[in-house]
Image (tube, grey):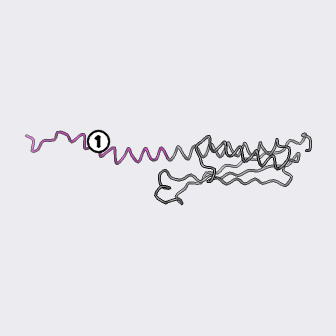
Amino acid sequence: MLLREETGNAQVEFLLVAVVFIVPLVYLVAFLSQVQAAAFATEGAARDVVRAYTIADDDADAAARAAASVKVALEDHGLSAERVTVDVDCVAPCVTPGREVAVNIRVRVPLPGVTSIGLDSMVVPVEASHRGVVDRLRATP
């Protein structure tokens, strides 16, 4: 003997489970994919900046190539160039044979959707470093 009719309860329970569990899970996956994209972008950009310095003819050319490579690496992964910091550490002139070039790139990844409500400070920093040496046997510019 049933005390009340239970038809239609499965639909309500499914909606409750979807809202409570699935929506935050989708948000987490979206956020983690942005962090992973930033990790790929910073690692590639750091490697490319060192490469730009090791093959350039002079420091001005190296800086221009480095800026272009960072821009391309970030755009390829859908990141904004205004959230990146690039630090190049070398003794000028950097393109001298035998000089070591060290690069550190930091990107601030915002939580999805929080910038639209004014919470710009909620970011996750992603950082990558790379070092390289200008070939000792190359001709001095």
Q: Position of residue 112 (x, y in %)?
A: 49, 50
Q: Which part of the image, by quadrant, shows the C terminus?
A: top right
* Disc 1, SS: helix
The residue shown at (74%, 50%) is: 103
16 relative to 126 in the view: left or right: left
25 relative to 12 in the view: left or right: right
21 relative to 121 in the view: left or right: left
The picture quadrant where one finds residue 25 is top left
Majority secondary structure of the magenta segment? helix
Q: Nearer the viewer, residue 32 or 57?
A: 57
Q: Which part of the image, by quadrant, shows the N terminus?
A: top left
User: Is residue 27 one of those drawn in magenta?
Assistant: yes
Q: Nearer the viewer, residue 3 or 15?
A: 15
Q: Nearer the viewer, residue 73 or 103?
A: 73
The residue shown at (26%, 43%) is: 13
**Amino acid bearing label 1:** Phe
Q: How many numbered circles does the render carry?
A: 1
User: Is residue 70 one of those drawn in magenta?
Assistant: no
Pointer 1 residue: 14
**Magenta segment, which residues?**
1-30
Q: Position of residue 136 (x, y in %)?
A: 89, 42
In the image, farthest residue toward the left:
1
Q: Position of residue 60 (x, y in %)?
A: 82, 49
Q: Position of residue 67 (x, y in %)?
A: 72, 48
